[in-house]
Image: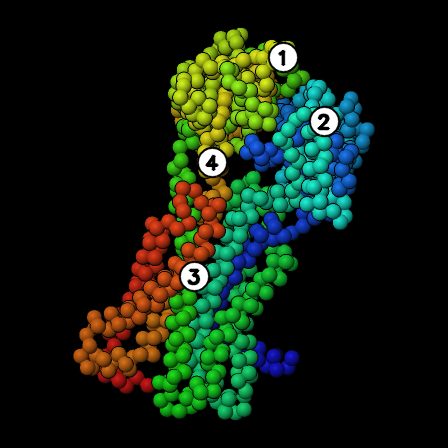
Amino acid sequence: MEQLLRDIRHGARMLAGSPGFSLIAILALALGIGANTAIFTVVNAVLLRPLPFKDADRMVQIWGSNPSKGVPFHNVFHSDVCEWRKQSQSFEAMSAAAPGSTNLVLGEQPERIDTWRVNACFFPMLGVKPQRGRAFSAEEDRPGAAPVAVMSNALWQRRFGSDPKIVGKSILLDGTPHTVIGVLPAKFQFTGRTIDLFTPVAASETRGGPGDFTVTVFARLKPGVSVEQSQAELNTVGRRLEQFRGTLGNHPRVWGLRDFVVRDMRASLIVLLAAVGLVLLIACTNVANLLLARAGMRQRELALRTALGASRARIIRQLLTESAMLGLAGGAAGILVAYAGVRSLLALVPDRFPLLSDASIDLRVLAFTLAVSLVTGIVFGLAPALVSSRRQALNDALKEGGRGSGESMSRARLRSTLVVTEVALALVLLIGAGLMIRSFLGLSRVNPGFNPKGVLTASITLPRSHYKEPGQRVEFLRKLFAELRAVPGVQAAGATTCLPLTQHNTGTGLVIEGRPVPPPTEIPLVWFRIVNADYFRAMQIPLIRGRVFREEDQKGPPVALINETLARRFFPNEDPVGKRFTNGIPRTDPPTTWITIVGVVGDLRHKGLDEPADAELFWPYQQLAPGVLAVVVRTNAEAEKFAPLLRKAVARIDKDQPVSQIRSMEEILDRSIATQRLSVILLGIFAGLALTLAAVGIYGVISFSVTRRTQEIGVRMTLGAKAGDVIRMVMGQALVLTVLGVAIGLAAAFALTRFLGSLLFGVTATDPLVLTGVSVLLIVIAALASYLPARRAASVDPLVALRYE
């Protein structure tokens, strides 16, 4: 320990004696370690940190799955959940959950709030206890039970002023009084989402109307039971239910809760972690080159210490102590870089990213930073220490003329190897960033199938307590559109049950009249939307054939519109207009209701710009009149300016009716590619940092080489070499190293970028334009980085150079 402290004190004096070298090294390391710490902070929050629930590692989410229809997961019927509970032994607790929203009427400010209907076991299963009041009892989670609610701390503070007497009070939800029985803890979030209010699932649905309903499912495994074991058991239960009910093709699927929540983020995070790892390696090669150059200037000092009895191991330990101190200093500065980086990252992250709100620098992150700093110090310090401590090099340093020894050549080879390495690493990162950028540019140019400019959207849910009859809902919409059309600047107004790019899909079977009826498991599944007559005009969705809906369709026979994809898939060689279909197996008692296709409209990218259009059909709002809808208003100006006018129009019709999720269609389109944009921004930043570090590394090595070869250059110029010859010689050295690094980097990129395949759109992992462009860019940057040292070499006075050392 005493020797270590002595090494630390000596190292501190040496580093303090070279402040320029120390600051440059610490800055390079701070950028590399800071970037790694920032991304690891996100990885820690999303992938590593335990979820804030009881026995979080045993929490699972259960979905339905229909592989034959291409549906990887979907909600399941509540009746199935009840059977799963009865017939399975793998689960300690299982709760249905029905996410939704509710109209909260409070004073003159109605609000649409996010609600979940859950079973009474939900909160005990999570190990969550209300800070005030209590959670649901089993008696309250039964059909016909008195309506009760548990609210979030945020809602309690925002709408009720943290009223200490809130428990026991009645609030109006969708026109129905509910008694507040509890307030949840302030820190409670479920997988990163803040839910305003919870009600019992069984009791809530009974009041909404009879019949089965769909839910998602959360459960806690019994100790010692794996996800695979629970999946096998539910497969058996599912097959029994299929045989009993005659419904085939739907299968339960068990996911670890965290695995499901972060399924769309894992690949991107791994790519970003690999990218910052490359940045750190490039920073390490730069600092290693600095240490190598500095060790060359300390050869006489090290030789004297050896002559006085210091062993090679002692010299290596001293040099590694100094490099470790640099690594720790870079790590300390890197924490500051990471703190700023995480804050900036959270500002860029879309709201829908789960668990990221909890990203913070905790003890695990600090331990990671400490480990990275120490390992980094050893990695970039080891090679220079081994080369500089060779006995032959130290003996030569004591002799006159030792500069020309073979050891100097070995140091030169190591410097060249480090430059080639960082060029190769930078190329891999630049190619990855280039592929992602090109992919994103292609994605952003995709035609979504509608014109988002000037379109305002909003969500409206008409409670059954006030709008029980379909005619009442149709009349509300008629009045609303009449109000909106009277507003100057409004060009069209429509409604739909599902906005494009919001990932809300509802499917139905499709059986075409006059064709053989397939078995139940083979009935094709298509997505459907319910829209009003002006929806297509408001969204500027083109009509390809036939007509759109009309007001008179309300009292006419059932009609529908289909998109081009459905027309191509099911009517490839015929005109679909006039054809009829039904959404189930035709029957005679009661007779099947056939729906007539009256038009074909253009395709929409409903699931995402990177997903091809699915087969879709549209039903007229006038015939079905659902209570949940999204209003779309086309304006001749900035859509956001019309938000207050929309609220006022709704209030004039029903003062207790809230309007929620008011946003422009351009915002929805922008948010649909927010994940890809964030990845591109971060990769672009890291690639720019790598390019800068590589350029600095090339400049440093060539500059150091020019300094060491000053005498040689003087001799060449004395013998007749021109300035241009010297420039070509120096730049040629840099370009040889760069081209070698590019060649190695291209080989590595071919092997590594294939892992990006799932993240790319419209571009292959071996895109020749990106590979060529990045290679040329790196060579040009290397040429520019070596030009200044080359010019300095060409301006050397031969007489001065001949006297150099």
Return the residue nearer the eye: 446 or 359.
Answer: 446
Q: Residue at x 41, y 15 (%)?
A: 546
Give the mark nearest the N terminus, 2 or 3: 2
The 10 Å Cα crowd at callout 4, few under 14, some 14 to 19, many 20 or more, is few
Q: Position of residue 189 (x, y in %)?
A: 66, 41
Q: Given this view, does label 2 or label 3 mark the residue nearer the observer?
A: 2
* Residue 611 - label: 4
The image quadrant of residue 732 is bottom left
Task: Tell me which amino acid carries mark 1.
Answer: Glu
Task: Tell me which amino acid carries mark 2.
Answer: Phe
Q: CA distance from mark 4 to mark 2?
A: 37 Å
Task: Tell me which amino acid carries mark 4.
Answer: Glu
The 10 Å Cα crowd at callout 1, few under 14, some 14 to 19, many 20 or more, is few
Task: Tell me which amino acid carries mark 3.
Answer: Leu
Return the residue nearer the eye: 562 or 173.
Answer: 562
Q: Secondary structure at mark 3?
A: helix
The residue beneath circle 2 is 244
Residue 504 appears in the picture as rendered: yes
* Residue 425 - label: 3
718 with respect to 511 (left or right) = left
Q: Is residue 209 above or below residue 330?
A: above
Q: Is residue 206 above or below residue 159?
A: above
* Residue 469 - label: 1
Q: CA distance from mark 2 to mark 3?
A: 60 Å
Q: CA distance from mark 4 to mark 1?
A: 37 Å
Give the mark nearest the N terminus, 4 or 1: 1
